[in-house]
Image (cartoon, rainbow, N blue to C red):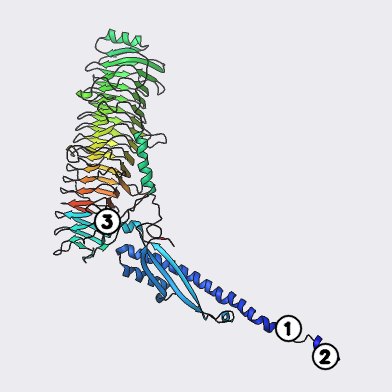
Amino acid sequence: MQRVHRLLTDERGGVLIIGALALPLVIGVASLVTEYGLALVTKAQYQRVADLAAYGGALAYTRNQSESDMRSAAGRLAVLNGVDAGKLTVALVDSPRTSGAKAVSVTINDTQPLFLAQVLSLNTDLEIASAAMAEVGSAQQAGCMLALSATESGITLSGGTQVTSKSCVVASNNNITLPCGTKITAIGATYNSAAAPSICQWQPTLVTPDGANVTPVKTATPDPLAGNKSVANAVARLKTVNAMTAPSAPAVPSGQDIEFAWDQNRTKAQAGAAGCTATWAQPLWTLNCGSKTALNFGTITVGGGINVAFNIQAGSGTTYNFSGPVSNTGSQMQFGPGTYNMAKGFTTGGGTTTTFGAGTFRIGRSDSGCNGGARVSICNTSTLTFSGPSTFELAGGFMNTGGATLTLGSGTTNSYRLGAASNGEAIIIAGGSKTFMADATGANSVFEAVGHINGGGGGSCLVIPAARQHDIDGNFLASGNVYLGAGIYTIDGYFALGANGGGGGASCNGTTSVTGNDVSLVISGEQTPTSGSCSGYAFCIAAGYSGVRLVAPSSGAMAKLAVIGPQDAARTAGALFTEGGSKGVISGAFYFPNGPLVMNGGAGTGGLSDACFHPIASRITLSGGTSQVSECIGGAATGGGKVAIVQ
């Protein structure tokens, strides 16, 4: 019995039994830690390689729309990162993020043998899969020239036209028509019509930069600026512009009339009645109002051949109120600095010279027409200079007549609020005149015109000031030379150069055509010209306007956005380059999603070495000219760069 008891109570060897029973579990846990842990590390490595391969494949595809190059690039990146290219599956698919866009899909499939883990599983291999997807960049996919409409004619060339697009593709959501004698040089072309592109078979009409033939690819191309935040914000500004109100004529008390004439007694008496003294030293009248800081006058006139020094010893704190019209029809007239409230306008006569010190100028509309024309706030027929920086609030705008010179302000902190003359125009420029508006870039500076800008005088010079924002509730028309100061031009109407002829001219701020650096034009197309070469177009360059230069900002919200046409689908007015408007430079996106771009009559655009012209329109029709185009989408786009990982 003792032997039996010892056998039953002997614990020796128990650990071995328990250990034997637990060994499979220990091995299984070890397999999870080692083999499955190693699989997770491998999967993470493969995911990184898949991301790189998809991104590189997308970049390769954007260069020339070649799926072969896409697969080769993805494979090379995989091999360079230690993954056999045979484990890759590379495909061009629809993007899961952007409707109508394409993406490069890369999947890496591999297996890892299991050793220890077979204790817990019958599987001998563990499958490892990683996948990535990179959306083909919309800017590159859009191409250098894009016709958006699926129902209009697409891209059409005729009359010996040539287009150079050395770094990207041209794209049409309908057809491409290239008859013999025309030529497009590009790295690729896309179309999306039912019929194949109509391309001359007898000449190299659609070629790469090295002369090889390009085979168009059938695919739809999305609008690369649809949803662009900068475009949306710029267009939204049109509502603000449309709601602007013109400055009112200043309300002033009635005052004493003064006629500076050869009748000394009368002039002295009128000056005395106004609380001032007038002294005569032929041919000069000197008005002195002492230390008064508020002066009220009625109508001011000057006799022929007479000069006037109008209280010029007073300081800038003096306020001058004029209840009647003020005019210089004498010889020379000089005003000091201060605040000038003129209820009935200011006029200069031919052959006169008039100067004002810096100040604030609130001027109502005249009761009589300027030079037999519209009633304005400032009517200049000779030489008129306002020093600066100054603030201008002109209820009736201004007119600078033929051969006259008008200077408004100096420095950089001027400000302009312009109402309309009796004919609806805020600025009226006649032939041979020169108009200089000093910059308005100060913190409180504005440039507002409630009325049209009519720089319609051939041979004239008009300098528009630099300003962060140029708000124009009306049309912008020019026939002379115009210098556009930097900034955004929000035009609730049309922009037309040479619509009524002209286009010749004087040097304007060192240029001889229409020039704007760091400018963006935003055009509503609410109105279009009703006659002449530009009839029906929201943007037009005509009448021999060669050498036009419009260069978009290189940074900021409006970077690379040169011209934004009507965005309302109901406004289909487009853009026209015609009548020899050649050798121009437009650098930036030229965006007319609802209207056509038409070039004819020898018109065209060139380019700077660092510039781009990126036309995007409902259709593009070119004849008899040459153009150089390139990709340059800018602004605050919604989607992230040209190529982006989306899965």
Q: Which residue is mark 2?
A: 4
Crowd around label 1: few <14 · some 14–19 · many ≥20 (10 Å): few
Q: Amino acid at mark 2?
A: Val
Q: Under tag 3, what secondary structure?
A: loop
Mark 1 near mark 3, Cβ–Cβ under 8 Å?
A: no
- The mark nearer the N terminus, 1 or 3, is 1
Crowd around label 2: few <14 · some 14–19 · many ≥20 (10 Å): few
Work out whether 307 lies above or below 459: above
Q: Amino acid at mark 3?
A: Asn
In this rendered view, identify the residue nearer to me: 126 or 408: 126
Work out whether 319 lies above or below 557: above
Work out whether 25 lies above or below 221: below
Q: Amino acid at mark 1?
A: Val
- Kindly report which numbered mark, 2 or 3, lies closer to the viewer in this rendering: 2
Residue 257 location, x and y as percent? Answer: 31, 12
The reply, left or right, for residue 455 in relation to residue 125 is left
The reply, left or right, for residue 38 in relation to residue 61 is right
- Kindly report which numbered mark, 2 or 1, lies closer to the viewer in this rendering: 2
Residue 386 location, x and y as percent? Answer: 32, 28
Query: Which image quarter holds the C terminus?
Result: bottom left
User: Residue lying furthest right in this view?
Assistant: 2
Give the Cα distance between marks 2 and 1: 21 Å
The reply, left or right, for residue 77 in relation to residue 576 is right
Q: Under tag 1, what secondary structure?
A: helix
Mark 2 near mark 1, Cβ–Cβ under 8 Å?
A: no
Give the Cα distance between marks 2 and 3: 97 Å
Q: Which residue is mark 1?
A: 15
